[in-house]
Image: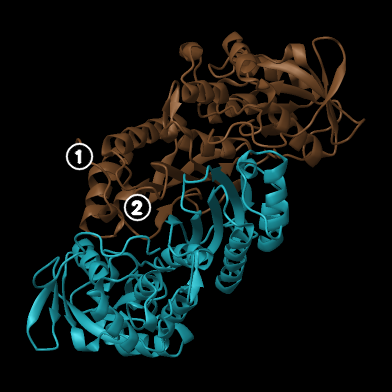
Chain colours: A cyan, B brown
């Protein structure tokens, strides 16, 4: 397939499409359910006795990130990690993914193959199977190269109840590491700025980190969310609103890499509103904050985890940030568009 | 939302995006699981005793049809029916859908609302719930208006085993109605041809028809497939290949509407290779052919059902068409691209 490009015929349902499926998708994804080429693929959720233990969850996300390849990841890795993380944020074990490709006529086959290989690698890393897929081709100019949709099915173990409305006054607010890396990497890479070499996307599957958290604090883990579009600030606002609680966050305690801080200042962006793709916010019952923090720091993806604030009963629905200067300001949701095509 | 257009900010994860979700998606889809706005939505598959009876199946498809609105349907109706039908072709009851939207900056909100309303109506018609969603916005020129991905989860009842490798020599080949309507409707509508008024897409959810077939002939139903891209001919070739059998099909017995025949001749297309979106091919044990035919004809979506051929043990992997002239020709899979952006 070297040197080739996507033709309209690759989306026709005929022989060219069959070749693409066999020589590219099946070869990299290596899954028996996918290889059967049925209209819908069998998936197993029950145990051998036919009992379904736990709660099945379902999610979807489309990925349109530009550029397609960037330091720390690419659109393929993102398409697996993003959907795996949406499942993990409910405490679920990610099990099965679907993959829908929208390709622009003329897309280099090498680009598609690179993204597909990344998907396969990320899926192995997360322990999830890609079992169903679809490819559409639009004429040149009808799409920007390559869009990927993934949907995911996961299983929440019995006894785990993690949701956006779970935060309670007295809970601790933790973040699993430094914020802003993904968004600033995309933005500086796109702008061709010189300091981009020190920035790298944090794109990673977080299900292992969530398992470590659950093992450490169990039902004390009330809410999880990955601060993607809209960043940490918007995510905290969403949780405060869904849970009907207030939050007080200490700006000084939020980990931010120096390169992100520098790039943010140069571009006039607030890193609290910039997307992350390998970080989570955990709301944990107060007495379990230290145990949760220790569990995260012991995991490769949580080494820079930090306690950044507390859930309070006052000013429900509102997040107050204690600034570096000791004053308080209200964190609102992202209002307009800060960074398009970030994920 | 009247008169408005999609802005980049609608995809930012901030307040504009939240408004779009609340005022458009939640309003039309009306689903409690969706309304909870979790990263992943709870779905129920087991009975109240926690037993999972049957086989869970998973599928996905993206929809890029152009024009977005056409006689007999639109991209929204197609996005629900297409994925519901992929589930139904395994004999599954369609239960849950996800919906991923990729929107071009500048898309009229009225167009989006019309498509979303169609999705909601088609979902009610099929008895399926839309429980998870995602919206991305790409800048003007980065996509052609509106693309929709849906993924679907269904449950195959115990004892039902329908798959592409199920056809056996002696089986009857049935089609549920006239072929070519959808593809020719799209093509003539796109070309602005005068006779388009008599053509209408057959876009419809086929799960009810499949239930009727299962009730009538049960395990005698070996294979189901909806002849979408590549049309009836490509679908038959796929089944012949997957099942390792030959097929003999009688051209005269294949139902084709006069308007489709006329449009095909004018455009130089073969209706056997044109996409359908509300038809199925059923491969049924020979002795049950009449019962299957009667069950289909008693259903509103199967009134024009016909027996079109037989599965044979000779020429495995090959479909022979007995032509109007009495000669035989080999039906191959669609080779290049006949009709782009058909679904």
Q: Secondary structure at mark 1?
A: loop
Q: Position of residue B115 (x, y in %)?
A: 36, 35
Q: Position of residue A289 (x, y in %)?
A: 30, 86
Tell me the quarter of the image containing the N terminus of chain B: top left
Q: Secondary structure at mark 2?
A: loop
User: Residue drawn 36% across and 85% down?
Assistant: A292
> Relative to residue A24, is residue B279 drawn left or right?
left
Cα separation between marks 1 and 2: 20 Å
> Relative to residue B109, is residue A128 drawn left or right?
right
Task: Locate residue A177: give its quadrant.
Answer: bottom left
Location of mark 1 (residue): B1
User: Residue drawn 34% across and 75% down?
Assistant: A184
Q: Quick check: B191 above or below A84?
A: above
Instruction: Check residue B14 in the rendering and tell me which mark sits there, or answer none.
Output: none
Disc 1 with disc 2 on a shared chain: yes
Location of mark 2 (residue): B139
């Amino acid at each position: 397939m070297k040197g080739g490009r996507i033709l309209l015929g690759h989306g026709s349902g005929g022989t060219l499409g069959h070749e693409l499926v066999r020589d590219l998708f099946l070869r990299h994804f290596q899954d028996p359910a996918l290889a059967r080429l049925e209209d819908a693929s069998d998936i197993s959720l029950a145990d051998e006795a036919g009992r379904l233990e736990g709660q099945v969850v379902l999610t979807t996300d489309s990925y349109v990130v530009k550029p397609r390849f960037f330091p720390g990841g690419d659109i393929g890795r993102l398409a697996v990690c993003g959907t795996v993380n949406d499942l993990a944020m409910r405490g679920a074990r990610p099990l099965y993914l679907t993959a829908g490709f929208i390709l622009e006529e003329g897309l280099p086959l090498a680009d598609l193959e690179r993204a597909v290989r990344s998907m396969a690698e990320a899926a192995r890393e997360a322990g999830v199977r890609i079992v169903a897929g679809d490819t559409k081709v639009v004429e040149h100019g009808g799409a920007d190269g390559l869009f990927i949709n993934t949907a995911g099915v996961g299983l929440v173990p019995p006894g785990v109840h993690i949701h956006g409305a779970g935060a309670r006054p007295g809970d601790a607010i933790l973040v699993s590491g430094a914020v802003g890396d993904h968004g600033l990497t995309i933005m500086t890479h796109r702008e061709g700025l010189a300091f981009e070499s020190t920035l790298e996307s944090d794109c990673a599957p977080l299900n292992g980190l969530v398992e470590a958290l659950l093992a450490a604090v169990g039902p004390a883990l009330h809410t999880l969310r990955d601060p993607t579009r809209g960043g940490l600030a918007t995510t905290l606002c969403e949780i405060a609103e869904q849970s009907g609680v207030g939050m007080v966050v200490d700006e000084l305690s939020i980990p931010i890499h120096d390169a992100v801080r520098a790039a943010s200042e140069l571009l006039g962006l607030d890193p609290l509103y910039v997307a992350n793709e390998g970080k989570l916010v955990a709301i944990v019952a107060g007495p379990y904050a230290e145990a949760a923090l220790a569990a995260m720091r012991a995991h490769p993806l949580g080494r820079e985890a930090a306690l950044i604030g507390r859930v309070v009963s006052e000013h429900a629905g509102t997040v107050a940030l204690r600034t570096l200067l000791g004053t308080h300001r209200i964190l609102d949701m992202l209002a307009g568009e800060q960074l398009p095509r970030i994920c």
